[in-house]
């Protein structure tokens, strides 16, 4: 069995990239099994003493079990923001792809420009808006800005334009369906793979969101995991009495990525199915 040089080189490059991306995750798994002393004194990329169970127990008991509250907050923010952003993106993407209205091209060009703007650059003006609306230090200060997903709108616009023939929509209109009925009964089922993709991206972005809740929230009972673990980390490096140890913080970071992995595994069949969907002839 022979291999072309290009094929071998491609496999080597892909293998190196896989190691590069998996190495931090491997370190996190290994580090979560160590106590605070072993975390700094033993080999970084291999197991020594196994303290994962103890770390998990301390994690969920630290500060009266506040980690569970942070975990619940992150799940709530991710689900509400993810579903809301997906619904808004679906409506806007369909409108840009299949409806004709004044200023459509100008609005879509503006949307493409918004994709290029870093999210952190919008945090300060968003804070000022939320402050004027008296929403700072509430869950809405985190959820409302997360409902806007310009990339999701762009992705669904492209998908609808290429995958849903105009003939399908016209046939539904001839049968007497209204525009909203055409969207919900004809377009929406065909958009399922793209919707799952946008939902995953939106949920991951909301779950990993750090700077926005850091600026908006001061009540630790409203913190997501990202901000809560940062608060523990700051306490640990300052050496405050009763602060979480670094091993517990690392364990908390490992637990925090488990829901994302579970969400991807549950939704990947819909995502993969979208790769083979084509237009109806």
Image: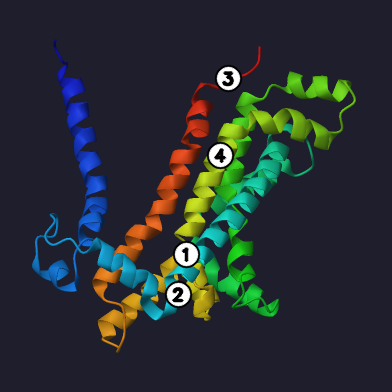
Mark 2 residue element: helix
- Earlier residue among tags 4 and 1: 1
The answer to whether residue 224 shows anywhere in this view is: no
Distance from label 4 to label 1 (Cα)?
23 Å
Image location (x, y in percent) of residue 259: 44, 52
Q: Is residue 265 above or below residue 159?
A: below
Q: Which residue is mark 2?
A: 66
- Quarter-of-image position of residue 184: top right
Label 4 vs label 1, nearer the camera = 1
Distance from label 2 to label 1 (Cα)?
9 Å
Classify the position of the N terminus by image quarter: top left
Mark 3 residue element: loop
- Earlier residue among tags 2 and 1: 2
Image location (x, y in percent) of residue 223: 49, 72
Q: Which residue is mark 3?
A: 278
Report the label total.
4
Label 2 vs label 4, nearer the camera = 2
**Residue sticking out furthest to the right:** 176
Q: Is residue 214 left or right of residue 45?
A: right
Q: Is residue 237 above or below residue 15?
A: below
Q: Which residue is mark 4?
A: 196
Image location (x, y in percent) of residue 160: 64, 31
The label shown at residue 71 is 1
Q: Are marks 2 and 4 in contact (CB under 8 Å)?
A: no
Q: Is residue 194 above or below residue 70?
A: above
């Amino acid at each position: 069995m022979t291999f072309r040089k290009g094929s071998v080189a491609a496999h080597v490059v892909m293998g190196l990239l896989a190691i590069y991306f998996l190495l931090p995750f491997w370190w996190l798994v290994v580090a979560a099994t160590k106590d605070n002393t072993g975390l700094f004194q033993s080999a970084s990329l291999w197991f020594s003493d196994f303290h994962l169970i103890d770390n998990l127990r301390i994690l969920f008991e630290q500060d009266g079990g506040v980690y569970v509250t942070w975990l619940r907050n992150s799940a709530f923010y991710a689900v509400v923001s993810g579903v809301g952003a997906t619904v808004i993106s679906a409506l806007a993407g369909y409108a840009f792809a299949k409806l004709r209205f004044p200023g459509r091209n100008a609005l879509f060009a503006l949307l493409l420009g918004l994709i290029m703007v870093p999210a952190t650059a919008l945090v300060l003006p968003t804070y000022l808006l939320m402050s004027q609306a008296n929403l700072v230090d509430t869950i809405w200060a985190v959820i409302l800005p997360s409902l806007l997903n310009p990339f999701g709108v762009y992705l669904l616009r492209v998908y609808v334009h290429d995958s849903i023939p105009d003939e399908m929509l016209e046939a539904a209109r001839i049968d007497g369906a209204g525009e909203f009925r055409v969207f919900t009964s004809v377009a929406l089922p065909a958009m399922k793979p793209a919707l799952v993709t946008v939902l995953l991206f939106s949920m991951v972005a909301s779950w990993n969101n750090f700077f926005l809740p850091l600026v908006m929230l001061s009540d630790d009972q409203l913190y997501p995991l990202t901000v809560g673990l940062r608060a523990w980390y700051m306490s640990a490096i300052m050496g405050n009495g009763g602060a979480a140890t670094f091993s517990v913080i690392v364990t908390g970071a490992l637990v925090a990525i488990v829901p994302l992995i579970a969400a991807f595994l549950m939704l990947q069949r819909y995502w993969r199915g979208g790769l083979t969907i084509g237009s109806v002839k």
